[in-house]
Amino acid sequence: METSYLKTLELNKIIERAAAGCVCKEARAKMLELTPQCDPDEVRFMLDQTDAINTLLIKNGSPRFGGVEGVSELATRAVKGGVLSMGELLLVAGALRNFQNLSTWYGSTDHDALTTDDLFYALAPQPGLEQQISDAIIAPDTMADTASHTLNELRKKIRATENSIRDRLDSLVHNMESSKYLQEAVVSIRNGRYVVPVKSEYRGEISGIIHDVSSTGATVFVEPQAVVEANARILQYRAQEAQEIERILTAFTSQVAAIEPQFQYSYKAMLEIDILLAKARMAIEMKAFKPSVSYESTFSLIRARHPLIDPAKCVPVNIALGQDYDSLIITGPNTGGKTVTLKTAGLLCAMAQCGFLIPADERSEVCVFQEYLVDIGDEQSIEQSLSTFSGHMTKITGILELAGPGTLVLLDELGAGTDPAEGAALAVAIIEELRRRGVLLMATTHYAELKVFALETPGVVNASCEFDLETLRPTYKLSVGVPGKSNAFLISEKLGIPERVIEAAQQHLSADDKCLDAVLGQLDDLKLQLKASQDEVESLRHEAAHQLEAAQKKKEELIRQGENELEAARAKARALAQQVENEAYRLTDELRQLQKDEKMSAQQRAQRAREIAKKESAKLFSNSDVVHNPVREFVPLKEVRVGQEVCIAELGQLATVLALPDRNGDVLVRAGIIKTKVPLKGLKQPDKMEKAPAAPKTKAQQRYTRQTGDGSRAAGGHVERVRRDAKMECNLLGLTVDEAIQEADSFIDRAILNGQSTVYLIHGNGTGALRNAIQKHLRGHRMVKSFRLGRYGEGESGVTVVELK
């Protein structure tokens, strides 16, 4: 690909802007060498990688990533036997730290398989080695005392010896006898040895070795004899210290050499990730999206924006080429946005081929061009004696040499700079030649002949950049299918050219020019009408969408209402069934009382029984109609406190809070003697409890009886028994012993949760094995207060009556 034309499209500025976001210098250099790829599959893969990193940046934020440079060469030198310095080892540690941080960042959130997986899986962190180097080396020229035990001991000896030397020299400089020989009372270092400044005339008064003389000769720096041996020991320790540091560096270098193969692989992956991160950051700044990639020579840019224009001022345009037409002739007034449209189309397609997301709608589609051939701008040159026209023709000559299938050609002001008639004819011929070569072409012009050519030629379409004649400002909107007017006369009149001059100019127009101008004026009017119609259609579409949304909500509301009514019917049916069972027990007891009444004959008893049955049947049928009983909504509690009384909404059961909500929002409560966890949103304020009115007693229940052992009242020799309903009974008939015991336990738990104190276990008589097993189990049940066999009317020995605690 001829890359010189890409500079005209300003692709280099996009790449430089992205390169500035690279952390590593080597990644920045690779970014600057980036060129458009010509394989559609490769382009699609690059865009997928950038989009994946862009998504992760939005979700995870930026990774902790530091800049390193030349570390690959350091690892290679370590393999060859070179010893890395402290600063170089710190660079290696920095690269290892980057591997670790990038791996952690990539896995910080769950995601499906991505095209960048191979890059991040190639990273091979070495946290142990990185930590050892960071702990041992605290600066490019400083080794920590803790780097090794030997180094620590040597430095302790050095400090101890230095302190002893300082103590001796301090006593010397502060001694009354010797201080008079000193130039000043200080201790300094010369050639790595501690010395004192002695006046030159007293150099013989202090015995020792002279290491230096001042520039004036008035002072000599003497190492006193008392510290010569100690200074010598320090030099010895220093030499041992240097040897130990060299040993530590050699050991670290050997570890780096051992991991060199995977380190090099990881380092290359890190640089690629750095480039992708820079691309993704720029995409976020530009609010860019990933386009789809077509295998055909066709592209469609929807709401495309030039990335180098201020987004607040840039007007999005829709540009398509290659489907219904292969050539687009753009007309309109100067400064109307024609050139920007050309550059936007070429630049965005080239960006996508470099793996950059583009500032356009995500529905946009690009294709892969083998060449970008561009003639934009004034090519006149004084040095080369080229006029504007000659400069353009020179550029077009080069374009004709390279043009072929898979080429995008962008021509600005084609044929300008010469005689209009000849320029227009030449422009038409150039367009025809380029179309024969199978290129996609976009050109701007002011020539009316090119507008007519586009109207008459299949595959060539006019487009125009709109211009507001009232404000004399361009709108920068592109209208495809309609040629534009230059509006030179109107603009000149608005700018103050006298009206008579404008009228005279109009007289000089040919009849064809006037006819074309009138047609274009009519097209402008039609375009405005079409735009108004489109706005009206859009408004109606929005209104229809709102009505559809309202209808959808109404439908959902009706569905919910139907579900509520169905649930109400089911609840009514369950309540009715429960009532039937309860009434059956009551009627059984009443009929038994009738049978024992000796004052009534058999015929009277039968008649009375039929009356009771008829009356109760009528009552049940009157209650069988289903009424709307919507599910009662409640306001869930937002917070609770320990000891607070609440209501479990699903069960309608009162409970007491035992603990505050856990991290899952579940609250520990006690309902009766049962402890359980309930979601906070499933709790509500307890309703005000109202005492239900007592049901009127039947005649049989109104007969007073004497007080019996099970808590019933006694009078007149008859027994008023405890009211018994189906919720108090558990039918264990037909179950094995294990099944019956398990069912009885579950039933007792539910009874306790419902606040019941008495339940009935129906096991029948049979062999007595099931009864004995049940009663044996009840003796050890911690929630059973007592139990007994049923009395007359309770099932007798076929039922066990259980009193709960």
Image: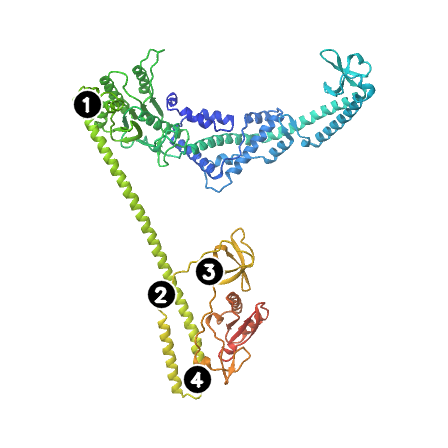
Question: Residue at (56%, 59%) from the top-left corner?
Answer: 643
Structural crowding at the residue carrying mark 3, measured as other residues with C-alpha within 10 Å and reported as few (<14), some (14–19) or many (≥20): few
Could you tell me if residue 305 is visible in this image?
yes
* Quadrant for the N terminus in the image: top left
Numbered badge on residue 627: 2
Which amino acid lies under the numbered mark 3 shown in the image of this protein? Glu
**Residue 306 versus residue 701 in the image, above or below:** above
Q: Percent position (x, y) of residue 556?
A: 35, 54
C-alpha gap between disc 3 and disc 4? 44 Å
CB-based contact (under 8 Å), mark 1 and mark 4:
no
What element does badge 4 sit on?
A: helix
Label whose residue precedes the other's in the sequence (4 or 2): 4
Distance from disc 1 to disc 4, alpha carbons, whole Å, reads: 120 Å
The quadrant holding residue 71 is top right
Q: Residues within 10 Å of mark 1 (few under 14, many from 20)?
A: some
Residue extending furthest toward the left: 511
Camera sees residue 765: no
- Label ID, residue 513: 1
* Mark 3 lies on residue: 650
The residue under label 4 is: 595
Front-most of residues 577 and 72: 577
Residue at 77%, 14% in the rendered image:
199
* Residue 704: x %, y % from top left: 49, 82
